[in-house]
Amino acid sequence: MKTTKILLALIFISLFKSSFGQEEKNFASANDFYQKKEYHKAINIYNSLLFNGQQSYEIFYNLGNCWYKLDNYPKAILYYEKAKKIDNSDEDLNYNLNVANTKISDKIEVIPVFFLKKWWLQFQNIFSEKQWALVSIIFWIFTSLGAYLFFTTRKFIVKSISFWAGVTMLIISFITGFAGYNKYKESTQNNSAIVMTAAVNVKSSPEEESTIIFVIHQGTKVNLALKINDWYKIKLANGSTGWIKEEDLEII
């Protein structure tokens, strides 16, 4: 019985290593096609990796670059935005996304963000959710160390320093943990999309016969507020809202 379990474990490990090795080869092959300017071949391989559940910053970013090279700016924006959900600290990504946004028809004026919220978002975007989790754990360890010193030492000065240091570390641990939680929510919630139809009539309600209130074009990023059947209520960066069909969008 034990021999059978060991054999099954070895087979599983072998298959896992083989699968992982093949994925690495496929990724390298896609990168090679990109370097050769065979963008459609590269896209096919990157998409096959996504289909097999291998979602990563590098795959989304490279897909964005491929579509940009093919002058398909809406698709480029879509995949740059997908990459940005995972890690928005890469200057090259943000530069490429900004350039791609200059290539589309709609230039949406963004509503200014309250300075405290802007500061928090900038702070939150320093690290990814995994990095924030690691930082939070480190400060939690320091908090525990402070608590240990406080309860074990008899010296007043050490007790006082360890208490206030522990409280400070605890507060920082909560702040960094909250930042990581928000980053996690950003990366997992499907609350934004890119318009993929050339021109879309935005309606006043989720009905075909409702009034057209404005028109948006492919490549425009929208926030998704509500879904009713196959209609989404969208909100633009300038605050405008309306309803469009699900088929006109691709979720980020």
Image (tube, grey):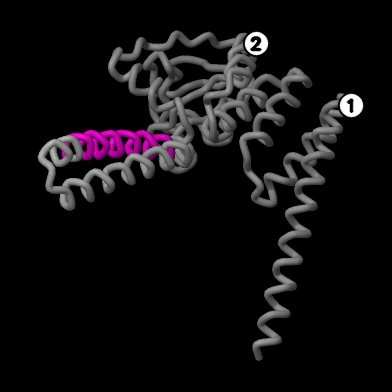
* Residue 183 counted in the magenta span: yes
Horizontal relation, residue 9 to residue 144: left or right: right
Cα–Cα gap, marks 1 and 2: 24 Å
Horizontal relation, residue 224 to residue 17: left or right: left
Main SS of the magenta part reads helix
- Depicted 2 relative to depicted 114: above or below: below
Answer whether residue 209 is visible to the viewer in this image.
no
Q: Residue furthest left?
A: 156
Residue at disc 2, secondary structure:
loop
**Residue receiving disc 1:** 36
Horizontal relation, residue 103 to residue 190: left or right: right
Q: Quadrant of the N terminus?
A: bottom right
Q: Nearer the viewer, residue 217 or 189?
A: 189
**Label 1 amino acid?**
Lys
**Label 2 amino acid?**
Lys
Q: Position of residue 119 (x, y in %)?
A: 34, 17
- Depicted 64 relative to depicted 159: above or below: above
Answer whether residue 178 is visible to the viewer in this image.
yes
Q: Nearer the viewer, residue 11 or 146?
A: 146
Residue positioned 49% across, 29% down in the render: 244
Residue at disc 1, secondary structure:
loop
Q: Residue furthest bottom?
A: 1
Q: Position of residue 180 (x, y in %)?
A: 39, 37
Q: Nearer the viewer, residue 211 or 194?
A: 194
Determine which quarter of the picture holds residue 225.
top left
Marks 1 and 2: CB-CB under 8 Å?
no
Residue positioned 17% across, 48% down in the render: 153
**Residue receiving disc 2:** 103
Residue positioned 76% across, 66% down in the render: 14
Per the rendered image, the range of residues in magenta is 163-184
* Residue 139 counted in the magenta span: no
